[in-house]
Amino acid sequence: MLELTVDLGDRSYPIFIGSGTLSDASKLTPRIRAKQVAIVTNETIAPLYLDKLKSLLNDFDVIDFDVIDIVLPDGEAFKNLQTLEAVFDGLLQARHNRTTTLIALGGGVVGDMAGFAAACYQRGVEFIQIPTTVLSQVDSSVGGKTGVNHPLGKNMIGAFHQPNAVIIDTDLLATLPDRELSAGIAEIIKYGLICDPEFYAWLQANIDKLMARDTDALVYAIHRSCADKAKVVAEDEKESGIRAILNLGHTFGHAIETHLGYGEWLHGEAVATGMVMAAELSCRLGDIAQDQVEQIKVLLQQANLPVLPPEGMTPDDFLSIMAVDKKVLDSRLRLVLLEQVGKAVVTSEFDRSKLDEMLAEMCVC
Amino acid sequence: MLELTVDLGDRSYPIFIGSGTLSDASKLTPRIRAKQVAIVTNETIAPLYLDKLKSLLNDFDVIDFDVIDIVLPDGEAFKNLQTLEAVFDGLLQARHNRTTTLIALGGGVVGDMAGFAAACYQRGVEFIQIPTTVLSQVDSSVGGKTGVNHPLGKNMIGAFHQPNAVIIDTDLLATLPDRELSAGIAEIIKYGLICDPEFYAWLQANIDKLMARDTDALVYAIHRSCADKAKVVAEDEKESGIRAILNLGHTFGHAIETHLGYGEWLHGEAVATGMVMAAELSCRLGDIAQDQVEQIKVLLQQANLPVLPPEGMTPDDFLSIMAVDKKVLDSRLRLVLLEQVGKAVVTSEFDRSKLDEMLAEMCVC
């Protein structure tokens, strides 16, 4: 088992990564503050792992936990204020108080919603992440971003709220659908592209192992991704600067998700295409070479990821949705671009006509 | 004009108190970060003061503000997630970004909702409070508590989010209904009771002036209340200890509000009765004398405030609602009681039978 610490002063927390970590109560129970525990999960994950987690809590004989579970519908389409209210309903019906601990057992949607519920319930309670998808293991479980979507924009309502601990058990990936495995690998590739050229090279050499769910390869790639992300987040917790590089591909990707309606494309799929778009623009701006763009596309395609926007989506669709994106500051469009393969930058200083060119070329109407 | 600072390190902010402060753009505009401004107000306040505030922003000729307004329905009954969504709708439709500033123009409900919307919109934007009721001027505009109600409990969903500034113009109280003036005075009396015996004596001597809306008396009482609250909040921003004394009367009061449905009794009215209940219990516990309880009742009655629970509300109604109150820690009921008139304490160490006795005596079924 590997361990790393997200270094955020008095909000620092550990991440445990390995095969079988969820069978080890010693990682979980010391991080539960009092007796009340609310497991937030979804309809897909509940039949697979809820009993396992409950019995882990029951087996621990020092504390007699008072455990409830709140089972949400599955999918990004339910990541909204209405579903969030169901979490509050469950907590209040069970009379959970300020010392309760929420445990997010699920993918990114469950983690974002349980984390936001924890941020808001009685103005803030503690929570623990047990992410069950590659994407949530490498992305949403690290860094404290929580929230829900609004019909007019993704993640528009939320909070920064750090978990007490993140427990990543790669055994849980056995039941992950192939499409979701790929979506998670998109985010893993992102870390190589934005800040870790050595890891990018490792990914080019080992993408087949990851796709075959080789345990060692998964543990290595997840640990390295979390370490990369933890480093960036420790530098800039509230995203006032460098943290924004984690959004490589996300501005374009969010536009795709908003345009299609949440849940049509997986987040990682949208990010994959978004990263290609960012790379294509970086190439037009003279920062990376065309063959490097092609290599990025090859790697993403080896992970069965899309590299073109959805059919029918126009440049105007992108520009109109992107105008309200959180990365727009004072009405200027800011994008994450590649200065090199392995080094991203955030900038609003780019030749706008190159953006239009790229969009015109990549949008297949 | 009086000014004081709420001392919270890098989240410190000024409060300006006086007659005509809202005619003085120099207090407001330097605290607006960028161009976008969203005024959140309600149907009652909008026709009275919205234009005044807008023209103040327009007159300021250095910055060309982009101002929208979001007008909510009036009343505690609308302080919920559904109404909150209307604020997000307005912000997103107008494409407000992370640098927007929300201005809460209204009473406590508007302040709590606008503040919570600011805490959550794009994971946190800045906001300014312009409270228009006595209650919000002395209570909800100081201290950073924001949030909405849930059918099962008041203020159960929220965040700590400090404003950039609070601008209190006592001229705005000219249009405040008498019942709301009284409700605000309940909270003013609370500061005397919990931490300021000298102020309590001043209130006994000057209650008639306050009820007659004498400007000097109002400015003095509001400033002293804000200063008392600011001192407590600076000691304990997140309510891990001493801050809880601000909740004198609130545990019983919230139970009354929850039992009746939000909006039947005004918050200050429920707190007034709650303070009498806390005082009666403190008396039974031997901490204050019966004639001190009677003096508190006289003062509240001079302010036209209720001193008995609503008819038909039983001891069991209180106990059942209070069990889920935020001040319950690990299932033990904690209450704010009076050690002296002018000194409150928070405790779960009290003779429970005295609570039952007090409830049995005060509940008129």
Image: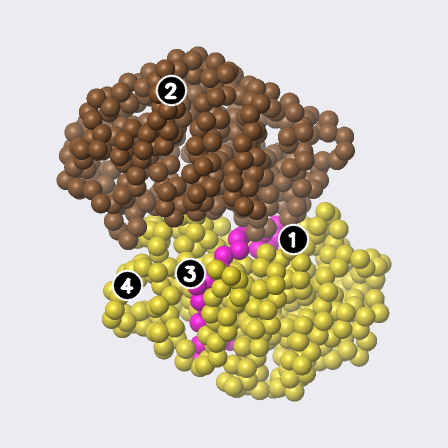
Chain colours: A yellow, B brown
Question: Is residue B90 visible to the viewer in this orientation of the structure?
Answer: no
Foreground: disc 3 or disc 2: 2
**Where residue A33 sits in the image (x, y, percent)?**
35, 60
Give the residue type that dot 1 points to. Lys
Give the residue type that dot 3 points to. Phe
Crowd rating for badge 2 (residues with CA inside 10 Å; few <14, some 14–19, many 20+):
many
- Residue depicted at x 61% and y 24%: B22
Crowd rating for badge 4 (residues with CA inside 10 Å; few <14, some 14–19, many 20+):
some
Determine the CA span between mark 2 and mark 1: 49 Å
Determine the CA span between mark 1 and mark 4: 40 Å
What residue is pinned by disc 2?
B203
Residue closer to the observer: B282 or B51: B282
Give the residue type that dot 4 points to. Phe
Q: Element at badge 4?
A: loop
What residue is pinned by disc 3?
A127
**Where residue B127 sits in the image (x, y, percent)?**
58, 39
Give the residue type that dot 2 points to. Leu
- Residue depicted at x 32% and y 33%: B343
Determine the CA span between mark 3 and mark 2: 45 Å
Q: Are marks 3 and 4 on the same chain?
A: yes
Q: Element at badge 3?
A: strand
**Where residue A189 sits in the image (x, y, percent)?**
64, 75
Give the mark nearer the N terminus: 3 vs 4. Answer: 4
Residue closer to the observer: A44 or B260: B260
Q: Element at badge 2?
A: helix
What residue is pinned by disc 4?
A65
Crowd rating for badge 1 (residues with CA inside 10 Å; few <14, some 14–19, many 20+):
many
Foreground: disc 1 or disc 4: 4
In the rendered image of this protein, does residue A217 appear above or below residue B80? below
Foreground: disc 2 or disc 1: 2
In the rendered image of this protein, does residue A260 appear above or below residue B100? below
What residue is pinned by disc 1?
A326
